Image: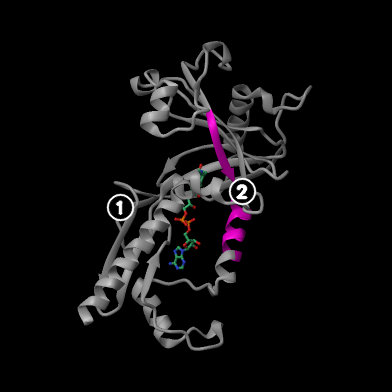
Amino acid sequence: MKHFQSQNQAQQAGITFLKGIEYLETPGPEYLSLTAERASQELGLPGTFRVLRADEFPDDKIKWGCEYDTWCVNPMQYCLFLLGQVIARGGKVFKREVRSTAEVFQLFSDGVKEFGETVPKADAVVNATGIGLGDDELVFPTRGQTCLVQEPCEATVTRQNADGSWTFCVPRGFGAGTIIGGTKEPDNWDPKPDPQVRERLLRAFEGTYPNMLAEGKSRLTPVRDIVGRRPTRKGGLRLEGEVVNGAGFVMHAYGLGGRGYELSWGVAEGVVEGIKGYLEKERSSRL
Ligand SMILES: Cc1cc2nc3c(=O)[nH]c(=O)nc-3n(C[C@H](O)[C@H](O)[C@H](O)COP(=O)(O)OP(=O)(O)OC[C@H]3O[C@@H](n4cnc5c(N)ncnc54)[C@H](O)[C@@H]3O)c2cc1C
């Protein structure tokens, strides 16, 4: 959160600061014993963290809830903002599908014609391919079906249901509607949205957070279904360097699952550290 708060251009970057609300139907002991003091001291949550009273829950299936200050990102706006910053600092962009990291080193030693000039040999390659390049048996997609609705929402709300399913909303901000979710389906590659799932998700959210509905309305207004794949990896993300024989140094940074935006700054710092460490070692071994 501190990275996002420190961006003085948060608005241009597509970031909205808002309230986060969590509802749990079957909270474990770690939730039931969570107080504002513990949340602040042990988990570093902001001082605005508050455990909700039972009379603030939307229904009696909810057994625990809390609210705190957080942020939501409009991904299209945020990625465009970052791209602008990369280009302004001299970064160059081109698109090509590759089969291996060795192929990327080869591209650079051959010269990239899109750049219209000779580019230097790559010192290192970052493998941030999400689901990986097909050579890691630990990665798999976790399908997520969501629905964009017209209505804005003043909070990001997440409900963990007793059957293991989720009901949530992520406002895009800037008048761009709200994402209502969502499913978590490991190893499901189906790209088609299911209209029955959309109905279920919208009904569940309307029941959980009726505040989102304009006065006199009982239904949200769907705009379009979205199916995405979270790049998941058994045992967690891969953030490590590898010397690929005959090619060069590769910094792997993939398998971020459903938390790619939340983890992005920490992962980027790990990537920079890994590459710097390798290059420094290389330089000193040549002296
Ligand atoms: C329903 C849903 C809800 C989500 N909710 C959240 C959330 O609340 N918070 C959060 O932080 N994140 C969330 N995410 C997850 C987030 O979208 C991902 O974690 C994030 O996109 C991962 O980013 P990434 O850049 O590592 O991988 P990706 O976004 O998968 O990007 C990988 C890139 O590599 C490129 N690529 C892959 N293979 C090759 C190849 N062979 N050659 C060339 N290019 C290649 C791809 O084209 C793509 O551009 C959600 C995702 C879904 C689907």
Left/right of residue 90 with respect to residue 104 in the rendered view: right
Q: Which residue is mark 1?
A: 138
Q: Is residue 148 left or right of residue 71?
A: right
Out of 217 and 244, give the one closest to the viewer: 244
Mark 1 lies on a secondary structure that is loop
| Neighbourhood count class around disc 2 (C-alpha, 10 Å): few under 14, some 14–19, many 20 upward | some
Asked if residue 228 is positioned above or below residue 98 in the image, the reply reads above
Q: Nearer the viewer, residue 10 or 186?
A: 10
Nearer mark to the viewer, of 2 and 1 = 2
- What's under tag 2, amino acid-wise? Asn
Q: Amino acid at mark 1?
A: Leu
Q: Is residue 75 above or below residue 68?
A: below
Q: Earlier in the sequence, mark 2 or mark 1?
A: 2
Split into 4 quadrants, where in the image is the C terminus?
Answer: bottom left
Residues at badges 2 and 1 in contact (C-beta under 8 Å)?
Answer: no
Q: Which residues are magenta?
A: 68-84
Q: Which residue is mark 2?
A: 74
Residue 248 x/y as whole percent = 30, 76
Residue 250 falls inside the magenta stretch: no
Residue 20: x and y, percent?
55, 31
